[in-house]
């Protein structure tokens, strides 16, 4: 199955496991970029993957 080109906010929440608030905070900081298609807010799936890949890694014991 191919990845979608873009996802809505609820789809991004479902795909990442992040909260809606965390997604909006990343958008506000400029870590993620969104586009508007009418009333829909869309995040490029590639941008979402890049954002997740750049999050800090988990370090046990810290």
Image: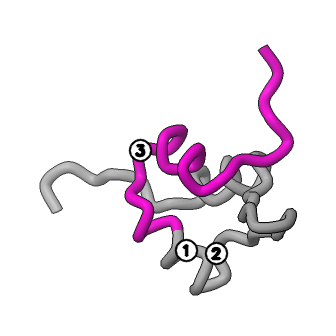
Q: Residue at x 17, y 62 (%)?
A: 62
Would you name the residue on which mark 1 appears? 26
Give the camera-side residue of 11 and 26. Answer: 11
Q: Earlier in the sequence, mark 1 or mark 3?
A: 3
Q: Nearer the viewer, residue 29 or 56?
A: 29
Numbered mark located on residue 17 in the image: 3
Looking at the image, which residue sits at the far bottom?
A: 29
Q: Position of residue 52 (x, y in %)?
A: 57, 53
Name the one closer to the observer, 58 or 28.
28
Q: In the rendered view, tell whether residue 4 sits above or below residue 47.
A: above
- Mark 1 vs mark 3, CA separation in Å: 14 Å
Disc 2 element = loop
Q: Which residue is mark 2?
A: 31
Q: Residues within 10 Å of mark 3 (few under 14, many from 20)?
A: few
Identify the residue shown where x is 58% and y is 85%: 29
The residue closer to the viewer here, 33 or 56, is 33
Residues tagged 1 and 2 counted as in contact (Cβ below 8 A): yes
Given contact means CB atoms under 8 Å apart, are the residues at marks 2 and 3 in contact?
A: no
Q: Residue at x 28, y 53 (%)?
A: 59
Residue at 59% across, 56% down: 9
Magenta residues? Answer: 1-23
Query: Residues under labels 2 and 3: Cα distance?
Result: 17 Å
User: Where 5 falls versus 41 (above or below)?
Assistant: above
The stretch drawn in magenta includes residue 24: no
- Looking at the rendered structure, the secondary structure element under dot 1 is helix
């Amino acid at each position: 199955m191919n990845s979608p080109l873009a996802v809505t906010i609820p789809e991004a929440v479902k795909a990442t496991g992040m909260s809606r608030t965390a997604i909006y905070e990343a958008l506000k900081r400029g870590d993620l970029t969104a586009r508007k298609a009418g009333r829909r807010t869309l995040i490029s799936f590639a941008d979402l993957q890049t954002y997740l890949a750049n999050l800090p890694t988990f370090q046990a014991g810290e």
